[in-house]
Image: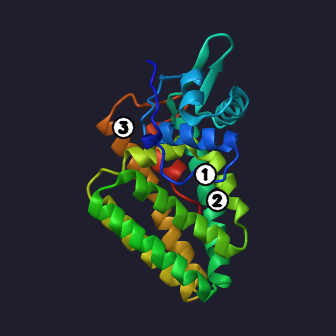
Amino acid sequence: MNTRLNQSDFLPGNAVGQPKALTAYNYIRHAIITMKMEPGATISEKETCAELGVSRTPMREAVLRLAQEGLVNVVPSGGTFVNSISLRGVIEGHLIRSSLELRMVRLAARSHDAVRDRDFDLLMFLQGDAAKRQDYDQSFAVDNDFHRLICTMAGFPDVWQTIHNATGQLDRIRRFAIPRSGYFDEVEQEHRAIYEAISAGDADRAHDLMRRHLDDIAAVVEYVFADQPGLIVQEPGFDLSTLDVMLAPAAQ
């Protein structure tokens, strides 16, 4: 299957001022995460270069980065294909994300600066607006921006990039599960509670709330398995009966 992308598939404004390789990377990654490019789809290098107005060199840099993240498979002389969603990749991404974010939220609570309250208020406004419009892509982007803000508040903004690079497979199922009932209200309430604990300087409570927030991923995986069997590839050696144990963030 050859899926051609359109500029409208990419969130507006993300490409402004970026290097061309990063623009191509974000453009394709967004399409993969949102399932506009489904598992098994062929990425047409020629068409994507034409759509973005970039040469093949930055395009190839973008594809190499996506391959390193496990999102695409490059077959020599055979093309570039979107990888299946790997259960192992989902779990690995969650382990990295939860380990780092649980540390970040403690640090954020210990070093809270009220100047960041405006950033949080803006994110909550955007989250509410996305919910009203049922804009799943915008809601997902704002969700990620909230977690990015916590890393910034903790004093380690680059940690978010580490999380981002490790969570491609995880992000695919997180985005897929957004339409499930109650998502918008749950996320807004949980984000508000976490930020209130950070603002109060209560590191233990912020950690506990973040742990519960991230613990929801087991339910997300089960939702995807039930809603679309076969979407996640289960590698040998994984026992689904212990999935909740593997995905539950460890207490720190």
User: Could you say where residue 93 lies in the image, as x and y percent from the top left?
Assistant: 59, 47
Does the rendering let one see residue 239? Answer: yes
Q: Residue 60 versus residue 97: which sits nearer the camera?
A: 60
Q: Residues within 10 Å of mark 3 (few under 14, many from 20)?
A: some
Q: Distance between the residues labelled 1 and 2?
A: 6 Å
Q: Earlier in the sequence, mark 3 or mark 2?
A: 2
Q: Residue 141 versus residue 49: which sits nearer the camera?
A: 49
- Which residue is labeled 1 in the image? 95
Q: Residue 225 carries which label?
A: 3
Q: Residue 141 versus residue 19: which sits nearer the camera?
A: 19
For image coordinates 42% across by 36% down, the residue present is 35
Q: Where 162 sits versus 154, above or below?
A: above
SS label for mark 2: helix
- Which residue is labeled 2 in the image? 99
Residue 230 as seen in the image, left or right of residue 109: left
User: Could you say where residue 58 lies in the image, as x and y percent from the top left?
Assistant: 71, 34
User: Could you say where residue 19 lies in the image, as x and y percent from the top left?
Assistant: 70, 46
